[in-house]
Image (cartoon, grey):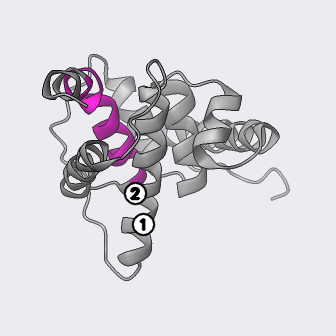
Amino acid sequence: MTETEFLSLFDRYHDMVYRLALSCTRSTQDAEDIVQTVFLKLLDVRTPPTPGKERAWLAQVTVNASRDLLRANRRRQWEPLDADIPFSAPEEGALFDAVMALPDKYRAVVHLHYYEGYSYAETAQILRTSPSAVSMRLHRARNLLRSSLEEDTYGPSVSKDL
């Protein structure tokens, strides 16, 4: 891979790699480290990704690097994200916070499908699962998000049996 090809791929995809890593790790520092790791891997790979498939290759490597990092740091405590992330509407900030509060397997699926625009099949391939598992995780994630956002809006739900 030539330097111009590498720089072109870096310019085009470094934001996507960073956002995906941030979604997986919940840490800006870890996300930055993963971006560096992913693009160093791109430089070191013997057979570069097929032209037109670079985005999927980078997403797969990012997810794997994130999993490796999380596995290595199981006992580490997470620090909250910076509050100064710019959003165009207040609802976007609340939605982002709700997505980041999801369990890992739901957060990754939501990010890949809604923020990065991958199909169920592409998301399944990246996460090494089945499209039906992606569909079920998205369904469950939407339900979790709906109840989380409704609870934030209306307060904790009260049981009707009382």
Between 36 and 50, the one nearer to me in the picture? 50
Q: Which residue is painted at 80% across and 59% down in the image? A: 162
Q: Which mark is residue 155?
A: none
For this view, does 130 lie left or right of residue 93? Answer: right
- Whether tag 1 and tag 2 are in contact, CB under 8 A, the answer is yes
Q: Which residue is painted at 21% across and 55% down in the image? A: 33
Q: Position of residue 71 (x, y in %)?
A: 44, 73
Q: Which corner quadrant holds the N terminus?
A: top left
Would you place residue 98 above or below residue 9 in this image? below
Q: Which mark is residue 66?
A: 2
Element class at badge 2: helix
Residue density around tag 1, few if under 14, some if 14–19, many if 20 or more, within 10 Å: few
**Image quarter for residue 133?**
top right
Element class at badge 1: helix
Magenta residue span:
9-24
**What residue type is disc 1 on?**
Asp
- Residue sticking out furthest to the right: 161
Would you place residue 107 above or below residue 91 in this image? below
For this view, does 41 lie left or right of residue 159? Answer: left
Q: Which residue is painted at 56% across and 36% down in the image? A: 110
Between 105 and 32, the one nearer to me in the picture? 32
